Amino acid sequence: MKPSRPSSRSRIGALLLALWLACCAAAPAAPPEPLAPDVVSSPPVSPPAALVIDRLPPDFPHGGEERTARDIDLIVVHSIGGPICKSGDVYFTPASGSAVFWRDWFIGEGGKSIHYVVGRDGDIAQQRPELRTAGHVSFGGVMTEVNRRSIGIELVNRGDGIEPFPEAQLNALSALVAEIAARYGLPPEALVTHAALDDRMQADCGGEPLRRNLDPGPLFPLKHVRVAIKSP
Ligand SMILES: [Zn+2]
């Protein structure tokens, strides 16, 4: 079939398209929006969670020793769960329950104590006032008097490297450590894990050596949480 000649309307359309390509398609693209430094160097950080903390009554009979703000230069993060050897197998103790549940467990436990517990839903409970020591680190490696100089925070998690840390929990922890660090003038490096302080081994388990403390476990994003702390 013989092709038909283009109509005058389609010729005008082609002309307009050519004009548009000539004037607009060659226009330089707008420069990209600069990325915020945090976006470049770390995963996205959600807005800080509002700090809602379940506190004990002011007249609650606390243990521990009195100290001053100048004594505090560390924040130690733990997880409730941890490794034990059970019939020759490594077993991680379960950690079900809210922050208040575990805060109350620490009160009844008697031996161990902690300043804060952060639950999976971002719920926070305080057991020990910050200006009283808590017993959460029994050995600090090269550091001495860790309990004297630190604030201890427990995360409700198995600490087994399998259970993830929910975003709500990490947001609440980030908001809590940022607020604490700002009050005491602490740098991001003041936030440390229990595992980094205590590298002692417990008895072999099924012929394999087993660390006493691995918490809060390999899935804990220490660098990500440290980003929340602004250097003084
Ligand atoms: Zn611990």
Image (cartoon, rainbow, N blue to C red):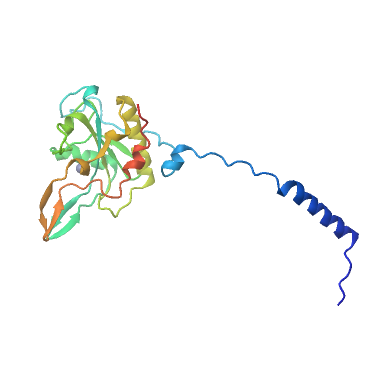
Q: Residue at x 65, y 44 (%)?
A: 29
- Asked which quadrant contains residue 103, the reply is top left
Q: Which of these two is toward me, 172 or 110?
A: 172
* Residue 65 falls left or right of residue 39: left
* Residue 132 falls left or right of residue 22: left
Residue 122 visible, this orientation: no
Image quadrant holding the N terminus, namely bottom right
* Residue 46 falls left or right of residue 185: right
Q: Which of these two is toward me, 135 or 225?
A: 225
Q: Residue 80 in the image: x percent, y percent?
A: 23, 45
Instruction: Name the quadrant where ligand 1 sits.
Output: top left
Name above or below for residue 167 compared with residue 55.
Answer: below
Q: Which of these two is toward me, 204 or 163?
A: 204
Q: Residue 218 in the image: x percent, y percent?
A: 27, 50
Q: Residue 11 in the image: x percent, y percent?
A: 86, 58
- Asked which quadrant contains residue 192, the reply is top left
Name above or below for residue 120 compared with residue 13.
Answer: above
Count of marks placed on residues: 0
Residue 15 visible, this orientation: yes
Q: Residue at x 21, y 48 (%)?
A: 214
Q: Residue 98 in the image: x percent, y percent?
A: 29, 44
Q: Residue at x 40, y 34 (%)?
A: 50
